[in-house]
Image (spheres, rainbow, N blue to C red):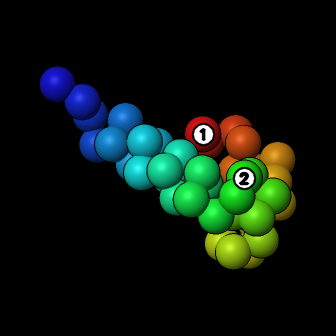
Amino acid sequence: MKTVHDIRRSNARKLRDGVGGNSSFATMIDREPTQTSRFM
């Protein structure tokens, strides 16, 4: 069974892939790309 953290990570990855990559996703959530890559 997936934990809530696994589900959130999976959802964040889907969002990232939907907007065109890590840099675009980071810009949309007002974070640095390095921060987003750490929790993915």
Measured in 3D between alpha carbons, the distance from the residue under mark 2 to the one under mark 1, in whole angstroms, is 12 Å
| Picture mark count | 2
Q: Residue at x 33, y 42 (%)?
A: 7
* Left or right position of 37 against 19: right
Query: 21 and 32: which one is in front?
Result: 21
In primary-sequence order, the first of circles 2 and 1 is: 2
Q: Residue at x 46, y 43 (%)?
A: 9
Q: Mark 1 falls on what kind of element?
A: loop
Q: Mark 2 falls on what kind of element?
A: loop
Q: Residue at x 26, y 34 (%)?
A: 3
Task: Kindly identify the amino acid type of the residue bearing the numbered disc 2.
Answer: Gly
Q: Residue at x 70, y 39 (%)?
A: 38
Query: 25 and 37: which one is in front?
Result: 25
Which mark's residue is nearer the viewer, 2 or 1?
Answer: 2
Give the residue number, with chain letter if any, for mark 2.
21
Q: Residue furthest left?
A: 1
Task: Kindly identify the amino acid type of the residue bearing the numbered disc 1.
Answer: Met
The reply to whether the C-beta atoms of the residues labelled 2 and 1 are less than 8 Å apart is no
Which quarter of the figure is the C terminus placed in?
top right
Residue 5 screen position, x and y as percent = 37, 40
Residue 19 screen position, x and y as percent = 64, 64
Quarter where residue 28 is shown: bottom right
- Label 2 Cα neighbours within 10 Å, binned few <14 / some 14-19 / many ≥20: some
Give the residue number, with chain letter if any, for mark 1.
40
Above or below: residue 3 compared with residue 27: above
Residue 35 screen position, x and y as percent = 75, 50
Answer yes or no: is residue 5 visible: no
- Label 1 Cα neighbours within 10 Å, binned few <14 / some 14-19 / many ≥20: some
* Left or right position of 27 against 19: right
Q: Which mark is residue 30?
A: none
Above or below: residue 38 compared with residue 34: above
